[in-house]
Image: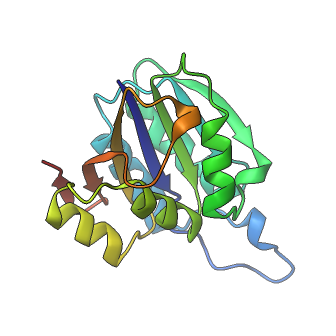
């Protein structure tokens, strides 16, 4: 059974003069939130982490991964920076089926769009409606894909098992 976890980067600091968006670090709150969401990930057996190369996503990964044992393989991908849902789906469809649990750390609006695209209508009403309402910084959505190969990802084919933020955790059904 394959599992996909989508994690939006934690809260970034406001840009300083002459700093581009790509290079924004996490804020103090963002560092704390990344560690907290990492604690919520304890027990997840992630095989591959696909992480945008933006500074805030790499910092989120560095803080959140401390709860993951063993450490998953890491793929740092420049193409994930502010990518669309379509680009994210295309990337996910390229993943080898030897990876059973993949974590993507990226940006909105693409992550929010793909999360809602994947969630079947049979998902927990509370978790799905909360995720639809907002996919805030440091939000984590965990989906069960069943035996669907990565290459066959399609709308409403995944079961939402968990939607969590550093302060709220809603399990699916």
Task: Please determine whether, in this image, residue 67 is positioned above or below residue 29.
Answer: above
Residue 91, given in percent of the width and then of the height, sits at 67, 43
Residue 94, given in percent of the width and then of the height, sits at 67, 34
Task: Please determine whether, in this image, residue 140 is positioned above or below residue 43.
Answer: below
Task: Please determine whether, in this image, residue 114 is positioned above or below residue 64.
Answer: below
Q: Residue at x 52, y 21 (%)?
A: 99
Q: Residue at x 56, y 41 (%)?
A: 62
Relative depth, front residue between 158 and 110: 158
Relative depth, front residue between 135 and 54: 135
Relative depth, front residue between 71 and 50: 50
Horizontal side of residue 4 vs 90, given as left or right: left
Relative depth, front residue between 162 and 66: 162
Q: Residue at x 21, y 61 (%)?
A: 127
Image quadrant for the N terminus? top left
- Number of marks present in the image shown: 0
Q: Is residue 33 visible?
A: yes
Q: Residue at x 39, y 60 (%)?
A: 139
Task: Please determine whether, in this image, residue 24 is positioned above or below residue 42.
Answer: below
């Amino acid at each position: 059974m394959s599992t996909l976890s989508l994690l939006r980067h934690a809260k970034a600091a406001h840009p300083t003069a002459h700093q581009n968006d790509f290079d924004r670090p996490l804020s103090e709150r963002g560092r704390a939130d990344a560690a907290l969401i990492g604690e919520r990930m304890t027990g997840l057996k992630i095989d591959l982490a696909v992480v945008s190369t933006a500074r805030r996503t790499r910092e989120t990964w560095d803080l959140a991964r401390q709860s993951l044992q063993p450490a998953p393989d890491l793929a740092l991908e420049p193409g994930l920076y502010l990518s669309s849902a379509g680009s994210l789906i295309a990337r996910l469809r390229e993943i080898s089926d030897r990876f059973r649990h993949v974590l993507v750390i990226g940006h909105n609006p693409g992550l929010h769009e793909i999360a809602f695209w994947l969630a079947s209508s049979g998902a927990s009403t509370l978790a799905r409606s909360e995720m639809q309402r907002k996919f805030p910084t440091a939000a984590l959505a965990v989906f069960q894909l069943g035996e669907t190969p990565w290459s066959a990802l399609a709308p409403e084919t995944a079961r939402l098992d968990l939607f969590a933020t550093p302060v709220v955790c809603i399990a699916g059904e």
